[in-house]
Image: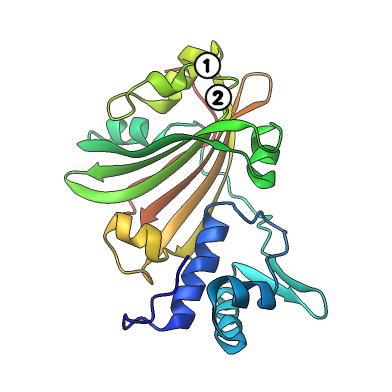
Amino acid sequence: MIINREVSKPVYLQVADYLRNNIYSEEWGKGEQIPSENQIMKSLEVSRGTVKKAVNMLVEEGLLYQIQGKGTYVTEDNISYSLGKGLLSFAESLEGQKLAYETKVITSEFRKATKEIASRLNITVGEKYLYMKRIRYVEGEKVMLIENRINSRLCPGVQEHDFNEESLFKVMEEVSGKKIAYSESRYAARVVGEKRGKELEVASDSPVLHLEQLVYLEGGLPVEFGNVWLKANKYYLGTVLQREEL
């Protein structure tokens, strides 16, 4: 990231966006220590006071916490809430509500697993997985940003499918030869941040509902680790947890 000092946005807010994006993108995993103030100062060429102000902002948001004399860490979420009896994808949920929707894939590429992603998908650090980013429109309006990280070892050829048109859950079941069994899901209120705010066409400080979900195939095999960012005023979107036969 390069700090732009020619724009009106204060530098500390740009630094806060940099920190927030590293957390949201799973570059820094839950419970991991983030780089020191000195490292951030050198990397972004900003002052210590600017870094402190940005870090304090994310501490107040609940994304970071500090231990005196040790450093700053990514907050570990340890509370999840069951929302019902059946696990549906968002697309399946929208279809059930007879809402018109459209999906656009904006990124689809293989990436090397960080420590956090590797631990979630039960793969080795550096192993390739399929990263996909999609925007979903409901009745013509952008309402959610979806980030999927797919265990391509369990889903050979998954990248060859057109996810503008096809359901990810259905394709994963087809190419893996196994049924999706269950998910571990958690929701939290977040500030969207600059990068994802631009993609959803909302202000960087807008509130969003954030879903983090780890989906398992039969046999307890983790197949997909995803993040969904929902506009906070779209309450009609819901999901449930136990997979049912469709």
Relative height, residue 34 to residue 37 (above, below): above
Numbered mark located on residue 152 in the image: 2
Residue 170 visible? The answer is no
Q: Are marks 1 and 2 in contact (CB under 8 Å)?
A: yes
User: In the visual, does 99 lie left or right of 159?
Assistant: left
Front-lying residue, 147 or 45: 45
User: How many neighbours does mark 1 have within 10 angstroms: few (below 14), some (14-19), or many (20 or more)?
Assistant: few
Residue at 70% of width from left, 32% of height from top? 122
Quadrant containing the C terminus in the rendered view:
top left
Question: In this rendering, would 197 be left or right of 217?
Answer: left
- Towards the viewer: 233 or 25: 25
| Along the viewing direction, whichever of 220 and 63 lies nearer the viewer | 63
Mark 1, residue position: 156
Left/right placement of residue 105 relative to residue 159 reads left
Residue 10 as seen in the image, left or right of residue 236: right
In the foreground, 158 or 3: 3
Secondary structure of the residue carrying tag 1 is: loop
Report the residue that reaches farthest toward the right: 69
Q: Amino acid at mark 1?
A: Pro
The residue at the point 29 percent across, 42 percent down is: 136
- The image shows residue 196 at horizontal and vertical percentages of 38, 57
Residue type of the residue flagged with mark 2: Ser
Q: Which mark is residue 35?
A: none
